Image (tube, rainbow, N blue to C red):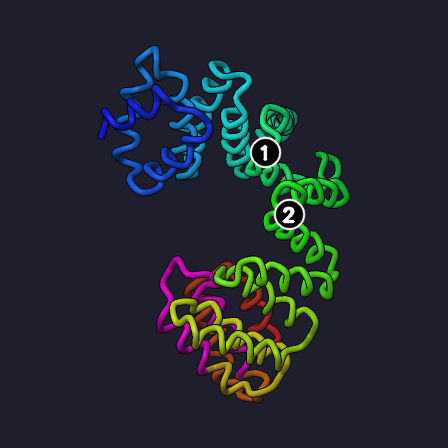
Amino acid sequence: MFLWVLAMSLAFQSSDFAQIETLIRDNPVAAEKALLKAVDVAETEARATLLLCHLYTNQKDYEKALPYGKKAVELLPEDSQANYLYAVAIRQKMSDSTMFAMANSGKYKKLLDKAIEADSNNLDAYEEKFGFLMNAPAIAGGSVEKADALAAEVKEKNRERGLIMQYNINQKRENHLQSFEIAKELIALNPEKMRYQFFYGFSLQALEKFTDASTFFGELYQKNPSEIGALYQTARSHILGEFDQEKAIAALDSYIEKANEKTQPSIAAAHWRAGMAYQQLGDKENARKRYTESLRLDPDMEEAKKALKQLK
């Protein structure tokens, strides 16, 4: 394993990154062990450093990723991937520390601009910058208008990824009809991708076509039983449309049975939704039970707190 990674590190070019990424994703322990050895070899130090930053950002371990990201940029200042990965590590810590974010947002933006300048086809760097523009406050440089311009630029390079950005922009602007049209185009480009199927269903919900949405998600689950999120969305469509609440409860109970602690939406959210369905049916006792169970599982769930308070 080590000899293989070492050989890949010696010959590493940007086109080889997918192969290294596969090892990092599929066997991170072995990848880390080999890279920690390769980083001490002069010929492989730079690339091993970069890949260690990649490995640790993958694991969201920014404390380990940051020093390797900084070193990678020092060793490979013109490398697009080095600048991008260091930016990711910085963003991960900024999400946890307001003080760090205030001190490092400028560096983060410069790294991303450098990554794009070094390789105008580094779509991951474009997506990282897009996320910042969409979510950062205006005072920090966030701007939906700038994100829109960036999405158009990406769309020229990769239509599918540009359309995803435009879908998210229209969702934020609550331009649901345009989101719906983009979702249809994405499905036409890649009908097997479940993410786009969910985009389509979410757009139906946003357009208040709840009957169509419940039918769509129900059929999606029947065709893809592993996609239990479609069960949750079937129930959500019934509850938002305030019809067939018994079917919503049955779908949520099935979802709860199949879900685990990592599933999203959470099991607590499913109990909260079930409480809403019972409340719509006028069954306050069962509504209270479900809201209480939701709070037992997640004491910080504000929606369940509010619902229980209103019920009382």
Q: Main secondary structure of the magenta part?
A: helix
Give the amino acid type for the residue marked by disc 2 in the picture: Gly
**Could you classify mark 2 by the number of other residues whose Cα lies within 10 Å: few (under 14), some (14-19), or many (20 or more)?**
many
**Residue identifier under label 2:** 162
Q: CA distance from mark 1 to mark 2?
A: 13 Å
223 and 131: which is toward the camera: 223
Q: Residue at x 62, y 25 (%)?
A: 103
* Location of residue 279 with respect to 205 vertically, above or below: below
Q: Position of residue 246 (x, y in %)?
A: 50, 87
**Residue identifier under label 1:** 121
Across the whole image, how many numbered discs are drawn on residues? 2
Q: Position of residue 221 (x, y in %)?
A: 45, 74
Q: What is the magenta range?
A: 250-277
Q: Residue at x 36, y 63 (%)?
A: 260
Q: Residue at x 41, y 17 (%)?
A: 46
Q: Is residue 18 left or right of residue 274?
A: left
Q: Position of residue 108 (x, y in %)?
A: 60, 28
Confirm whether the magenta stretch covers residue 257: yes
Q: Position of residue 309 (x, y in %)?
A: 59, 72
Specify the farthest residue to the right.
145
* Location of residue 68 with respect to 94 vertically, above or below: above
Give the amino acid type for the residue marked by disc 1 in the picture: Asn
70 and 2: which is toward the camera: 2
